[in-house]
Amino acid sequence: MESEVAESFFLPYEYVDLLTNPGLATSAGPVKLNQYLCKDRGNGGNDSATSFYKNFRWIKDKDGITLNQHVGGTAIDLALKGQGNDKAFVKIWNFMLKNKDLLDKYKVEVCGRAKKDGSKDVEKTGKIKQIYFDKMSDQAALQQMVQDRFFGMDCIGFVANFLIYTGEWDKYYGVSPKNYPKHVAKINIDDIKEVRPLDFMVWNGHVALVDWVWKLIDDKSAQIDMCQSSSGGPQCNEYVTLRRTGGKGVHGGCEFTILGGTPNPPVRGHLTIWRREGFWY
């Protein structure tokens, strides 16, 4: 996972736009990947997605090809965890659209977020074609399935897939947020005046990216835009105040906090800021 030492020609907001505005280009029109999905039970779990992929990935189309072969087993495993790539989602959705008859082969569970005790919250059970495609347009059906948590992205999935999108990574590397300073972005930024676009914002259990720095407010604060996937899915939070607290955080980095923003960033608390060597806009 060494640095490619490369300039990025994209900012994170452009990846948010690809995913959500107007959305990913399927054969039925754009579908917004505007949902947060994480395997971790405490972050809502992935019960709908699990009920979908466990059978559908193995069902064969008329040429005898399974979704698993068409998209790739690793790509589907990642999509199931909330770390799927944008290109993989388009392949999955187009396969579904081309093979709608296969969507009546078995039942799925439409689930809300996992309950506080970690158990499933099953809202309804039925066949995908009957619940979705028989009742609405193909585009609306896919969009409703995103809403119902069959598809989505978590914070690690967003950052990793942005790094793939902009050419910095050649494939997906799984790193937990707190280990980003060890493996991904090793340069600690402790001075507010040094914060730049593409710096990594690292919490103990969350990771986001600085998208733009508008201005210094004072010697401890700056106004920034940031991008992440959190509650509400991939998003850009504009005009956030980033303020240095003076404490020490993850990996001994200088602590910052965030205030305000449009829309409000869902994750608050203290974070540290890290830079990937040679990665710049």
Image (spheres, rainbow, N blue to C red):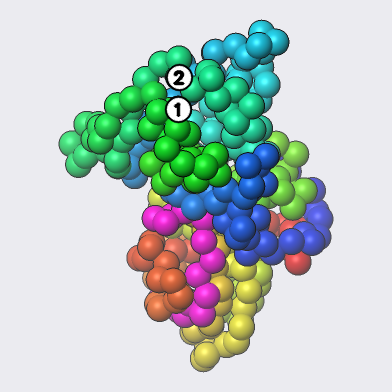
Question: Which residue is nearer to you in this view: 36 or 171?
Answer: 36
Specify the segment rendered in magenta.
230-246
Residue at label 2?
Answer: 104
Q: Residue furthest top?
A: 64
* Rendered location of residue 230, percent (x, y): 43, 55
State the residue at coordinates (39%, 24%): 127
Amino acid marked by disc 2: Asp
Q: What is the distance, in whole Å, between disc 2 and disc 1 at their CAs? A: 6 Å
Confirm whether the magenta stretch covers residue 234: yes
Task: Tell me the residue that label 1 is attached to.
Answer: 129
Residue at 33% across, 33% down? 110
Residue 44 picture location, percent across and down: 32, 42
Q: State the residue lying farthest toward the left.
A: 117
Residue 182 position (above or below residue 41):
below
Q: Earlier along the polypeptide chain: callout 2 or callout 1?
A: 2
Q: Amino acid at mark 1?
A: Lys
Residue 10: tell me if it is visible: yes
Task: Find out whether the residues at labels 2 and 1 contact each other: C-beta distance under 8 Å.
Answer: yes
Between 69 and 95, the residue placed more toward the observer is 95
User: Quadrant of the rendered structure where residue 139 is?
Assistant: top right
Determine the secondary structure under disc 2: helix
Quadrant of image for the N terminus? top right
